[in-house]
Structures are given as structure tokens and as C-alpha cells.
């Protein structure tokens, strides 16, 4: 059974940084991409960043330059470095993987096969 587990969330002040981690295990099919999504209260889940198995990365335009996605294939671990955090970045952050899609498709939740439970990020002003 596929397990996707996020960690690294917490509370920071505006302008601070956090690094999220995501460990995936128990899968029989290799992923074609992994991605980070976020969902604020009362908002729809939105794509943040994704990375293909060849390390090509994709970002939602509004976050490009502040957030950096990376992966350690040997450890099946995904990361999201978040810098210059703002209160509007407050959300539950989810890690997900897709065995079918790659590229910009991985910024869309419908392309994902497996999801983690999420890790909360709270940014105070």
C-alpha cells in the first residue's frame, strides 16, 4: 500500500522560511512526477510545484522564485523549500505523486494517484 507522509510544517512569522519533506513508500509503480499542493480554509486545493523523474520542475507562477521543489530519488523523498513566507501562504500543504502524468499536468490535483495527509503551515504577520 502506498504511503505518502509529509513533515516539516509549523508556525513562522512573515518573512521566515520552512522546508517541508515528503516520504513515499510501498508503491509498485514508479512515479512520473511528485508535487506539492496547498489548501487554505474555504479555498480549493491548488498546485504549488511539481518535479518529474528527470528533475524538471514546474511552479505556479505566483510562487515562482520563493518556493523551491527538489527530490532525493535515492531516498524517495520530496522537499519544498519555502522562503519569504507571507500570511497568505497559510494552508495545509499536501504531497502527492502520479504514476501517469508528468510536466505541467502535475500541477493539477486530478493527475495525482496518491496523497499524504498534509502538514499545516501557519504564517503570522
Image (cartoon, rainbow, N blue to C red):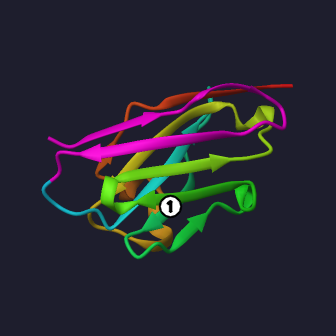
Q: Secondary structure at mark 1?
A: strand
Find out whether residue 20 is within the magenta segment: yes
**Which quarter of the picture shows residue 22?**
top left
The quarter of the picture where the N terminus appears is top left
How crowded pointer 1 is (Cα within 10 Å; few <14, some 14-19, many 20+) is rated as: many
Q: Is residue 84 left or right of residue 111?
A: right
- Tell me where residue 80 appears, x and y as whole percent: 56, 49
- Stretch of the chain drawn in magenta: 1-27
Chief secondary structure of the magenta portion: strand
Relative to 41, does residue 112 appear above or below in the rendering? below
Relative to 121, does residue 58 appear above or below in the rendering? below
Q: Residue at x 71, y 55 (%)?
A: 63
Camera-nearest residue between 37 and 110: 37
Find out whether residue 61 is within the magenta segment: no
Q: Is residue 53 left or right of residue 108?
A: left
* Residue matched to label 1: 50
Q: Residue furthest front?
A: 74
The quarter of the picture where the C terminus appears is top right
- Tell me where residue 50 appears, x and y as whole percent: 50, 61
Residue 45 appears in the picture as rendered: no
Tag count in the figure? Answer: 1
**Which quarter of the picture shows residue 72?**
bottom left
Q: Residue at x 64, y 60 (%)?
A: 60
Q: Residue at x 75, y 61 (%)?
A: 65
- Tell me where residue 20 appears, x and y as whole percent: 54, 40
- Tell me where residue 91 appears, x and y as whole percent: 62, 32
Q: Residue at x 39, y 54 (%)?
A: 110
Camera-nearest residue between 43 and 1: 1
Amino acid at each position: 500500500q502506498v504511503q505518502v507522509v509529509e513533515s516539516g510544517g509549523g508556525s513562522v512569522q512573515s518573512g521566515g522560511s520552512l522546508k517541508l519533506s515528503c516520504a513515499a513508500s510501498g508503491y509498485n509503480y514508479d512515479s512520473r512526477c511528485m508535487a506539492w499542493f496547498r489548501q487554505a480554509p474555504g479555498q480549493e486545493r491548488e498546485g504549488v510545484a511539481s518535479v518529474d523523474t528527470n528533475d524538471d520542475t514546474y511552479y505556479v507562477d505566483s510562487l515562482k522564485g520563493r518556493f523551491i521543489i527538489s527530490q532525493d530519488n535515492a531516498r524517495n523523498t520530496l522537499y519544498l523549500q519555502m522562503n519569504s513566507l507571507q500570511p497568505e501562504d497559510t494552508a495545509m500543504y499536501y504531497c502527492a505523486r502520479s504514476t501517469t502524468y508528468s510536466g505541467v499536468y502535475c500541477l493539477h490535483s486530478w493527475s495525482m494517484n496518491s496523497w499524504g495527509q498534509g502538514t499545516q503551515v501557519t504564517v503570522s504577520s
